[in-house]
Image (cartoon, rainbow, N blue to C red):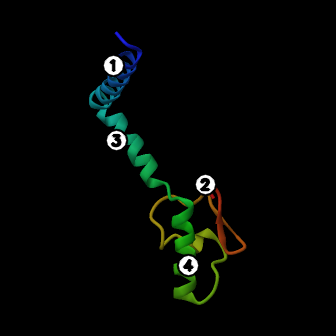
Amino acid sequence: MQLIHLAVASAVTVSIAGVSYAALKPKDVEHQARVVAAQADCRAVNEAIVAYVSINDRDPRSVNDLRTLVQGDISAYRIVSGMAAGPGC
């Protein structure tokens, strides 16, 4: 058996194990997906800032002003110099 055959067999085995884990624990996988999807990212907060300014013709004072424009949890973000600051920014 050549080294490339061993590498391919290992990769296939690992991917099958991952798919099997997901199939056997669907509630855990679904819960993790919902947690990740519920978190807003930096880009969404910046887009909400732009939308807020275009609607209200003034800068938002805090992320609380943006809550109606963003789906998800934005509590980890703040506004610094008119831009989002927080995780991933």
Which residue is tagged 2? 88
* Horizontal arrangement in the rendering, residue 54 relative to residue 21 (left or right): right
> Residue at 63% of width from left, 78% of height from top?
60
Three-letter amino acid code at the position of disc 2: Gly
Q: Amino acid at mark 4?
A: Val
The answer to whether marks 4 and 2 mark residues whose Cβ atoms lie closer than 8 Å is no
Please indicate whether residue 70 sits to the left or right of residue 27 in the image: right
Q: Residue furthest top?
A: 1
Q: Residues within 10 Å of mark 1 (few under 14, many from 20)?
A: few
Residue 64 image-quadrant placement = bottom right
| x and y, in percent, of residue 26 in the image | 29, 34
**What percent of the width, then of the height, locates residue 37?**
42, 52
The type of residue carrying mark 1 is Ala
Residue 67 place in picture, x, y as percent: 52, 69
The image quarter containing residue 22 is top left
User: Mark 2 or mark 1: which comes first in sequence?
Assistant: 1
Q: CA distance from mark 1 to mark 4?
A: 50 Å
Residue with the mark numbered 4: 50
Single out the mark in the foreground, 1 or 4: 1
Q: Secondary structure at mark 1?
A: helix
Residue designated by label 1: 9
User: Image check: 44 left or right of 79?
Assistant: left
Q: Indicate the secondary structure of the residue bearing disc 3.
A: helix
